[in-house]
Amino acid sequence: MCVIGRALMARPEMILLDEPSMVWRADRRGIFEIVKGLNTRENVSILLAEQNTMMALRYADFGYILENGRW
């Protein structure tokens, strides 16, 4: 949470998050709700690299899936 707060202080247009569900294992659904809320309330685009594709795609506006490093 501290990292996301620090990133928001710079008023970015986009934030890159790499595997947030691995960091917040206790509340995986909660972190995706926070990220979606930031997207809508703060008008910040989120580039999310995540292995839990089903959960990530539930909260995404659109997504790209790479399998074995290919589209």
Image: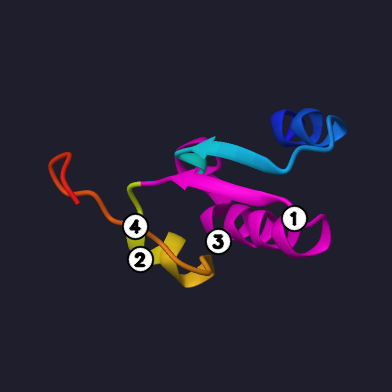
Q: Nearer the viewer, residue 11 or 29?
A: 11
Most frequent secondary structure within the magenta stretch: helix
Which label lies toward us, 1 or 2? 1
Viewer-closest of 48 and 13 = 13
Contact (CB < 8 A) between labels 4 and 1?
no
Amino acid at pointer 4? Tyr
Q: What amino acid is at disc 1? A: Leu
Q: In this view, does 56 lie to the left or right of 42?
A: left
Q: What residue type is labelled 3?
A: Arg
Range of residues picked out in magenta: 21-50
Q: In which quarter of the image is residue 43?
A: bottom right
Q: Position of residue 2 (x, y in %)?
A: 76, 30
Question: Which quadrant of the figure contains the N terminus?
Answer: top right
> Relative to 50, does residue 60 appear above or below in the rendering?
below
Is 60 positioned to the left or the right of 13 in the image? Answer: left
Q: Which residue is drawn at 52% across and 54% down?
A: 28
Q: In 3D space, how far apart are the residues under numbered discs 3 and 2 (Cα atoms)?
A: 11 Å
Which element carries disc 1, helix, strand or loop? helix
Q: What element carries label 4?
A: loop
Q: Do the residues labelled 3 and 4 touch (CB within 8 Å)?
A: no
Asked whether residue 10 is drawn in magenta, I would say no
Tag 1–tag 2 contact (CB < 8 Å): no
Between tags 3 and 4, which lies in front? 4
Point out which mark residue 29 bears: 3
Where's residue 34, x and y in %?
69, 56
Q: Nearer the viewer, residue 40 or 53?
A: 40
What's the residue at 12%, 42% (across, down)?
A: 68
